[in-house]
Amino acid sequence: MIHPVNSLTRLGRGTLFLLKVLAGIPQLFVRFGLVTKQMYSVGVQTLLIILVAGLFVGMVLALQLHYTLSTFGAEDTLGLLVDLALVRELGPVVAALLFAGRAGSALTAEIGLMKATEQLSGLEMMAVDPVERIIAPRFLAGFLSLPLLAAIFSAVGILGGYMVGVDFLGVDSGAFWSQIQAKVDFYDDVMNGVIKSIVFGFIVSWIAVFEGYDCLPTSEGVASATTRTVVNSSLAVLGMDFVLTAIMFN
Amino acid sequence: MFKSIELSVGIFVGAGLAALFMLAMQASNLSSISSDGFYEISARFDNIGGLRVKSAVKVSGVKVGQVKAIDYDSESFEAVVTMQVEDKYNQFPKDTIASVFTSGLLGEQYIGLEPGGDEKLLGNQSEIRHTQSAMVLEQIIGQFLFSKASENDNQGF
């Protein structure tokens, strides 16, 4: 049962928590090893699913579009359509959804379990601020990783589209690239996609660390916090995507 | 152990930057944007049809620049199109004709320049005097129907 006052209280708590995390980020530059370690578990371990998903999304896009485009004799624009679809929408959004499922849930579960087993209070007892030591590196790692993952997703997707379109379906290789280079604008299309993925990285990392830090310190509480991370950050990503698209491509 | 984590994170960040570089150079127009300078010329049209900012400016089918801005002059009731033309194509005579063409039957619209025979050349900020508006399909159909109808009227008498 969702109660409006409770939801607003949570939103306020989340915002205050975010401010605390952001205040803890500057001291991370002295000890960047903490962030590197988290980038391994958040970024590197998500890389495989991003590579595979990007490849297949690009391949299936090329198949579907070729089927429709060939009825108009417009196969040459295949590369352009695959590129635009990936760079503008699918790269940032699908990468963010996969990231929420693979890395966000793991972050929440890890932090929630630390809370349930009183490791966070233990740190506080030793006068170590858990937000600075535990939360901030994880937040920063997620925030830095997602734009890179989204760029890899788009690039691999385009290569997958090339593989299916040019190698299997016989679209001309020169037309594939020249249409892309003539029509895809670096600032309007590619950079706006990158900005999207930066925003999504911020949102997903924020939700993941907050849900973990805010969960009920029981096994049930950790489980429902993990679920909430995936559900809420997926919805937030899709909602934000509409808003950003409306602003950028108006 | 920590060294191998650092190495894999390094590979990850490197791959991410490489992907971004590929998107920039191979999968967008960044590599084809000329680093040369541009000069600006403008032209006035009665009707520009579906011309937009960034539409191509072509001579003999070769792209030499793009539309920079489109304004409306409320005194002369004309559209004013400002074009950026690359510096290396600076040999257009003063009496060049600018027309709004459509690539293919339903394709996008662009400005086609047809060089004239004048000895003076178009410089920066100069204006093309001879222009030809876009063809608007509804107008052509309207004219066709009108002339058909008047033919029928004449036969009646």
Image (cartoon, rainbow, N blue to C red):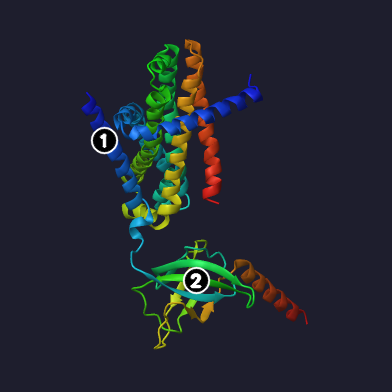
Q: Is residue A193 above or below residue A19?
A: below
Q: Which residue is mark 1?
A: B10
Q: Position of residue A206 (x, y in %)?
A: 47, 30
Q: Residue at x 50, y 70 (%)?
A: B101
Relative height, residue A58 to residue B84 (above, below): above
Between residue A150 and residue B143, name the one nearer to us. Answer: A150
Q: Tell which residue pokes out farthest to the front in this image.
A: A127
Neighbourhood count class around disc 1 (C-alpha, 10 Å): few under 14, some 14–19, many 20 upward: some
What residue is disc 2 on? B82
Picture layout, residue A85 above or below residue A119? below
Q: Quadrant of residue A154?
A: top left
* Residue A96 place in picture, x, y as percent: 44, 34
SS at mark 2 in the image: strand
Chain identity of mark 1:
B
What residue sits 74% from the left and 81% below the top? B154
- Give the quadrant of residue A205: top left
Chain under disc 2: B
Tell me the quarter of the image containing the C terminus of chain B: bottom right
